[in-house]
Amino acid sequence: MAKNRVSATVNGDAVEFLCETQQTLLDVLRDELRLTGTKEGCGTGDCGACSVTVDGRLMCSCLMLGVEAQGKSIKTIEGMANGEALHPLQRKFLEHAALQCGVCTPGMLIAARSLLERNPDPTEQEVRYGLAGNLCRCTGYHKIVEAVLDAAREMRGA
């Protein structure tokens, strides 16, 4: 089967990859680009574990084809930290013990970052709504919500 050549920007870096027409962006990220931080939870867009942003829009990478990434800017969990310095959301997830098995964590962090980019001062209800597409089977959600609210305060300088 012929492969498609795709050029995109991933975490600020220009990349080129070959992918089959039916290959998902999730599979391209993990198998072709070796960015394994993005997790597959359900493969149907129901859990949010594979969340990335594409041109600033939160997406489930299991629902997008790799060929659709042509010319797009994609951000994954690997691009969240600044070198060795963790993003405030990552630090707060650690401080609040807002993770357990880790399958949902990358998607939760990407969804939380997307929320805070749109709304730097969310209420608890807005955080819960912003993370509603991301399922966690281990922690419940209290510590996750608290971590996002704490990170938002820090990022605002409050």
Image (spheres, grey):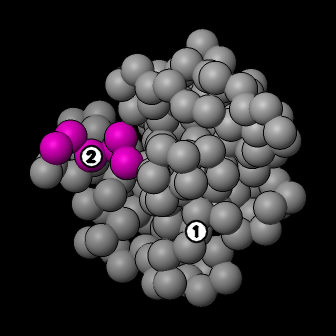
Of pointers 1 and 2, the one earlier in the residue sequence: 2
Q: Quadrant of residue 158?
A: top left
Task: Report which residue position mark 2 lands on.
Answer: 81
Asked if residue 44 is positioned above or below residue 63 in the image, the reply reads below
Q: Residue at x 67, y 82 (%)?
A: 137
Count of numbered marks:
2
Residue 43 appears in which quarter of the rendering? bottom right
Taking the magenta stretch, the answer to whether it contains residue 96 is no
Q: Residue at x 29, y 34 (%)?
A: 156
Q: Secondary structure at mark 2?
A: loop
Is 9 on the left or on the right of 56, as rendered? left
Q: Nearer the viewer, residue 47 or 16?
A: 16
- Residue ranking furthest to the left: 84
Do we see residue 63 in this rendering?
Answer: yes
Q: Is residue 158 visible?
A: no
Secondary structure mostly taken by the magenta-highlighted segment of the chain: loop
**Which region is colored magenta?**
78-83
Please state which amino acid type lies under the numbered disc 1: Cys
Residue at position x 48%, y 76% in the image: 102
Farthest top residue? 71
- Relative to residue 128, is residue 79 drawn left or right? left
With 41 as the anchor, is 45 left or right in this view? right
Which residue in the structure is indicated by mark 1?
A: 104
**Image quarter of residue 154:** top left
Closer to the camera in the image, 120 or 39: 39
Q: Secondary structure at mark 1?
A: loop
